[in-house]
Image (spheres, rainbow, N blue to C red):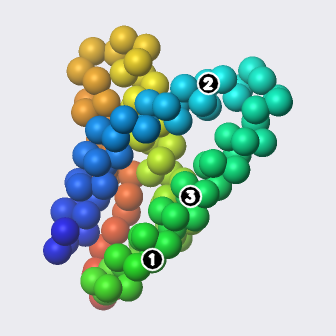
Amino acid sequence: MSTPDGLREVLARTALTMPSTTVVVSALALARGNPAVQPTVETGLNLLFRHSERFLEKELGEHGWTTDQGVGRAAKTFWSAVFGAVLISQAGFPGGPSSVDVAATLSLRPVDER
């Protein structure tokens, strides 16, 4: 993970292969039609996003990288792409989540590079 591209690839590969990712996608699907569980799912997502933001801030700071999206937006966009990739895979889309370039949703670069 010594380059922004390396970090993006590792994060995408890890997120797409975590068993808990499919559980989260299932919870999101259940919450869509069940207002009683929506607060619980929202709390879980907020926790995931906060942890992801802190991790990303730490990595950016340690390596002298930045994101033009802002850390909060980058984390939410990344996880939305992960969940979408898993969802279309579960729906039978050929090729699975690896057919979606989730890593490209994270715009990371060295601070001095434009």
Could you tell me which residue is drawn at 23 percent across and 54 percent down?
9
Q: Is residue 39 above or below residue 66?
A: above
Packing grade of label 3 (10 A; few <14, some 14-19, many >=20) is many
Q: Earlier in the sequence, mark 2 or mark 3?
A: 2
- The reply to whether residue 1 is in sight is yes
Do the residues under discs 3 and 1 have CB atoms within 8 angstroms? no
| Spatial CA span between label 2 and label 3 | 18 Å
Could you tell me which residue is drawn at 70 percent across and 45 percent down?
42
How many numbered discs?
3
Q: Is residue 91 above or below residue 9?
A: above
Mark 3 residue element: helix
Taking the image as shown, residue 46 lies to the left or right of residue 110, namely: right
**Which quadrant of the structure image shows residue 38?**
top right
Whole-percent x, y for residue 113 in the image: 28, 81
Whole-percent x, y for residue 1 in the image: 19, 68
Question: Farthest residue toward the top?
Answer: 92
Name the mark on residue 29: 2
Label 3 sits on residue: 49
Could you tell me which residue is drawn at 78 percent across and 42 percent down?
39
| Spatial CA span between label 1 and label 2 | 30 Å
Could you tell me which residue is drawn at 38 percent across and 58 percent down?
106
| Spatial CA span between label 3 and label 1 | 12 Å
Name the mark on residue 57: 1
Residue type pointed to by label 3: Phe
Mark 1 residue element: helix
Q: Nearer the viewer, residue 37 or 49?
A: 37
Mark 2 residue element: helix
Residue type pointed to by label 2: Ala
Packing grade of label 1 (10 A; few <14, some 14-19, many >=20) is some
Q: Earlier in the sequence, mark 1 or mark 2?
A: 2
Whole-percent x, y for residue 87 in the image: 46, 25
**Which quadrant of the structure image shows residue 99?**
top left
